[in-house]
Amino acid sequence: MADAALTSLLAEQSIRLDCAAEDRFDAVRQCGAALVDAGAVDQSYVDAMLERERTVSTFVGEGVAIPHGTLAGKESVKQDALVVLRFPEGVDWDGNPVSVCVGIAAAGGGHIALLSQLAEILLDPEKAEQLRNASSSDQVYALLTPDEDDED
């Protein structure tokens, strides 16, 4: 799982670039719904995502949040998956502006590997800005594909 390319976990219909949310919990619900729509999780995983958000913010910086379920929610995961939702008007994430949410579902301990891979990409200010401004699923795929040139 740790070696899986992020893009292999992201279906084109799981990229939604024109979302709007009332607040961070609404945004988390929308990420959860996208994971349900992708067939990756049961509806109960959405509750685990909301529980995680109530416990600790999934805001990671650079206008990005990575909502995911609690450890208890892993039993609701049918297959590992990612969803990318862009909120052009932004969402107040407990005082931080967020315009991109990357929802993740992973069985077992896969969350840690996914979070690590995502953080490497999304905490790059340039790539995060490009993702915040992405207008096509092709752009999202390109941004989530690690550059071999970036390897040290």
Image: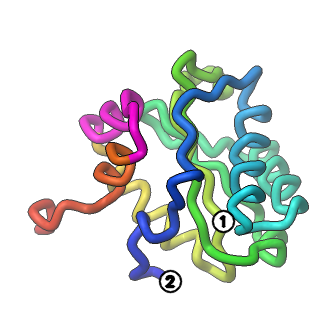
Percent x, y of residue 152: 11, 68
Say what secondary structure mark 2 lies in.
Answer: loop
Q: Earlier in the sequence, mark 2 or mark 1?
A: 2
Percent x, y of residue 1: 50, 83
Percent x, y of residue 23: 74, 24
Badge 2 local density, few (<14 within 10 Å), some, or many (20+)? few
Magenta run includes residue 131: yes
Residue drawn at (9%, 63%), measured in percent from left and top? 149
Per the rendered image, the range of residues in magenta is 125-137
Judging depth in this view, the residue of 13 and 105 nearest the camera is 13
Q: Amino acid at mark 1?
A: Ala
Q: Amino acid at mark 2?
A: Met
Q: Which residue is mark 2?
A: 1
Location of residue 31 with respect to 106 vertically, above or below: above
Task: Tell me if 115 is positioned left or right of 123 in this view.
Answer: right
Judging depth in this view, the residue of 12 and 23 nearest the camera is 12
Q: Which residue is mark 1?
A: 105
Where is residue 119, by image quadrant? bottom left
Say what secondary structure mark 1 lies in.
Answer: strand
Badge 1 local density, few (<14 within 10 Å), some, or many (20+)? many
Magenta run includes residue 5: no
**Distance from Cα at disc 2 to Cα at disc 1:** 12 Å
